[in-house]
Amino acid sequence: MAITLGQRSLSRLVGVHPDLVRVVKRAAAMATPAEDFTVLEGVRSREQMCINYGKGRTAAQCEAKGVPGKYAQPRAAKVTWLNNPFASNHRKMFDGFGHAVDLAPWPIDWNDLKRFDAVAHLMLRAATIEGVPIRWGADWDQDGKPRERGESDSPHFELAR
């Protein structure tokens, strides 16, 4: 029994590489109601990259990486560990598409990692069926052992090409 991606989720897939969109839609088609998920983000604007980079960083740290100091939020939790704040696979790439999506189980409970793992299982199965290599942010090295050595981006999926 499939789930139906809502209009908000579908709108967040606009501009994402068609192969990755196909994987997300296949995962939804394979999901049960207990495995319902939502699309949090697809293509990320430059401003959103600045906002994300500013979280957990001072103005000086931001400016050192080309991010205006106004985005600094040193008291906020850090949400990106990229050395280059503009290197996110969520940005529009050379082919004009974003190569990453963030998904979360619905309703969202950030502490229920088993439900994030269930979404990942769906996405990895769907990617295999569709013949699209992807990487999950909670298993960057793709060794099947999530969240080891700081791999903690459970919502993140990207093309692995």
Image (cartoon, grey):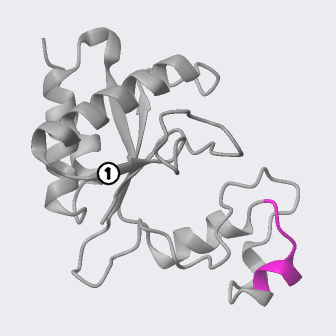
On the rendered structure, is 16 left or right of 119? left
What is the x, y in percent for residue 85? 61, 76
Three-letter code, disc 1: Ile
Please tell me whether residue 3 is drawn above or below residue 76 in the rendered image: above
What is the x, y in percent for residue 129? 12, 37
Magenta highlight on residue 58: yes
Q: State the quadrant of the C terminus.
A: bottom left
Quadrant of the image occupied by residue 106: top left
Type of secondary structure dominating the magenta stretch? helix
Q: Residue at x 19, y 39 (%)?
A: 128
Segment colored magenta: 56-63
Front residue (pair 43, 139): 139
What is the x, y in percent for residue 127? 21, 42
What is the x, y in percent for residue 142? 46, 45
Magenta highlight on residue 141: no
Quadrant of the image occupied by residue 83: bottom right
- Numbered disc 1: secondary structure: strand
Q: State the quadrant of the N terminus.
A: top left
Disc 1 crowd, CA 10 A, few/some/many (<14, 14-19, 20+): many
Please tell me whether residue 103 is drawn above or below residue 13 in the rendered image: above
Please tell me whether residue 40 is drawn above or below residue 97 in the rendered image: above
Query: Which residue is tagged 1?
Result: 134
Front residue (pair 10, 17): 17
On the rendered structure, is 154 left or right of 125? right
